[in-house]
Amino acid sequence: MANPPLPVPGPAPEVRLGSAWPSPPPSVGRIVHYHALASDGVSVLCCAALIISVPVSDTGTTVGLLVFRPDGTQFATGADLNPGNTPNPGSWHWPERV
């Protein structure tokens, strides 16, 4: 007996990015920097992170991240963009160009 055919997926949702996004806009698979609280609960670590989700929205600057911490990985859902120089815990930014 043959297996039934697999369903054909519909078109992927359009990702519309509003003016709140930085240039370039984030996309799945890109590397960013994430500000995480250190184990002492006070210091802030700058960790590499991989964008794993970008919302389909006109507004907002949050993405889903897989964060690579020195003590292990963590998921950060709803991580906010931080375009400034102040390391706010729970925020992300594009890596500096050196």
Image (cartoon, helix red, strand yellow):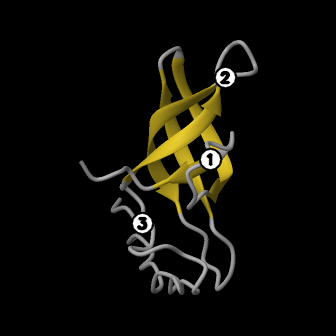
- Give the alpha-carbon distance from disc 1 to disc 2, as whole Å: 13 Å
Q: Amino acid at mark 3?
A: Ser
Contact between labelled residues 2 and 1, with CB atoms less than 8 Å apart: no
Find disc 1 in the rendering and name its residue. Answer: 86
- Give the alpha-carbon distance from disc 3 to disc 2, as whole Å: 29 Å
Sequence-wise, the earlier of marks 1 and 2 is 2
Whole-percent x, y for residue 22 in the image: 49, 73
Would you say 37 lies left or right of 7 here? right
Would you say 40 lies left or right of 76 here? right
- Report helix, strand or loop for mark 2: loop
Find disc 3 in the rendering and name its residue. Answer: 27
Foreground of the two, 62 or 53: 62
Q: Amino acid at mark 2?
A: Ser
Whole-percent x, y for residue 19 in the image: 57, 86
Which label belongs to residue 62?
A: none
Residue lying at the far front in this picture: please name it: 85
Foreground of the two, 7 or 92: 92
Taking the spot 48% from the left edge, 84% from the top edge, the residue there is 10
Contact between labelled residues 2 and 3, with CB atoms less than 8 Å apart: no
Mark 2 Cα shell of 10 Å, populated few (<14), some (14-19), many (≥20): few
Taking the spot 36% from the left edge, 56% from the top edge, the residue there is 30
Q: Amino acid at mark 1?
A: Thr
